[in-house]
Image (cartoon, helix red, strand yellow):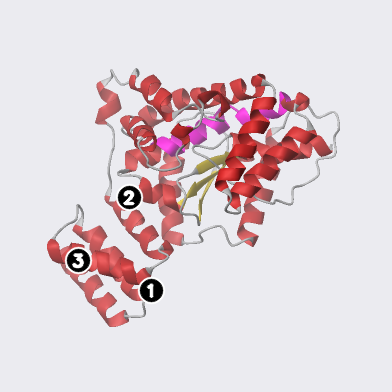
Amino acid sequence: MRSRLVTLLLLPMLCCSVLTQAQNLRLPDFGDPSLQYLSAAKERQLGAAMLQELRMQGAVIEDVQLNEYLNSVGQRIAATADNGHPYTFYWLDSGSINAFAAPGGYIAINAGLLLATRDEAELAGVIGHEIAHVAQRHIARQYADSQQFSLPVAAAMLASVALAAAGGSQAGGAAMASVLAANAQHQINMTRSNEQEADRVGYQLLLRSGFDADGMTRFFDYLQRLPGESVGQLPEFLLTHPRPGSRVADTQQRLGSTQAQNGRRYSQSYALAKARMQALTSSNNTTLLKMLQERLAKGAFDNEPAERYGYALALKQAGRYDEALTQIQRLLQRDP
């Protein structure tokens, strides 16, 4: 049972979009030593336990407007999966560009990922990819296949991820690479296959839900061009996800249909949600205020209502309520 529980701890890490950090979760004991796969009910129980723990750690963003927006996009895509699976979407208060599908249809999107996207279609592409992981039951399939996954290897992987999360990303990455290199290639191949399948299924979900499916490709391309310690610097066979470059090429082959590019790419709700997220999660509100003030003064923005809304929120965060009210009044005059 102990080795299976360690494997369960690893599963969310193996079903994420970019690179994840381990969480110390208090998980339920399912108690059945003959369990060969996760039932839908037990997946839901595990996902709920993870969300509860994240909330206890203060890692979840509890904001009504942001949650309503995320669920409007997520449920629109999930409705096209046709599997009757319930989905729960939530934001994590983290600046890293990341998202993951946890057991039971619990899908987490980092604040940093929303802020990194350039339009709603890119965000939808990530959400569609994570919904595909759930719809294809990748977590249960990995669990059923993980009986050969030894406790020492699992423990070493968790330790290396924890080391990276604690700030020693270089050492943690090297430790994980050595562990994975020594482990069976079968586990890596299965994970890569799941990621490719999630790309394919997610792409179809985007088409069905009316989003611009090219958003998935554009966001993968953006990840590939990120400077610094990006996923593209690791050897492909050691990645728990295919290289963004290979995923770009694979997805681009599906863009012959005009429907792919003609779907929804942008919305005012997206622009307002992104502005709100920036204001609520900024680590330096003074710098943010200065940047927004300068952009508004110069007209250097793509969406004035969203820019002014973000500025009003930043002013409110700084306790400058009269100035914030002035910005809101200007918004109301523009769009009563």
Q: Which mark is residue 155?
A: none
Looking at the rendering, which quadrant does residue 80 occupy? top left
Instruction: Tell me: 202 left or right of 237.
Output: left
Residue identifier under label 1: 317
Instruction: Tell me: 243 left or right of 316.
Output: right
Q: Residues within 10 Å of mark 2 (few under 14, many from 20)?
A: many
Residue 163 in view (yes/no): yes
Q: Work out whether mark 2 precedes mark 3 in sequence or the reverse, and give the earlier one.
A: 2
Q: From the top left corner, tell me how far across and down residue 185 is, in percent.
A: 65, 20
Q: Which mark is residue 270?
A: 2
Q: Which residue is at 22% across, 60% downward?
A: 305
Task: Report the mark closest to the observer, 2 or 1.
Answer: 1
Q: Work out whether mark 1 precedes mark 3 in sequence or the reverse, and give the earlier one.
A: 3
User: Regarding mark 1 in the picture, which secondary structure is present there?
Assistant: helix
- Amino acid type assigned to the residue bearing label 1 in the image: Gln
Task: Report the mark closest to the observer, 1 or 3.
Answer: 3
**Magenta-highlighted stretch: main secondary structure?**
helix
What distance separates the C-alpha of mark 1 from that of mark 3? 18 Å
Q: Which residues are the magenta region?
A: 125-145
Q: Which residue is at 19% across, 66% downward?
A: 294
Residue identifier under label 3: 294
Q: Residues within 10 Å of mark 1 (few under 14, many from 20)?
A: some
Q: Could you tell me which quadrant the N terminus lies in?
A: top right
Between 209 and 181, the one nearer to me in the picture:
181
User: Regarding mark 3 in the picture, which secondary structure is present there?
Assistant: helix
Residue 105 in view (yes/no): no
What distance separates the C-alpha of mark 2 from that of mark 3? 22 Å
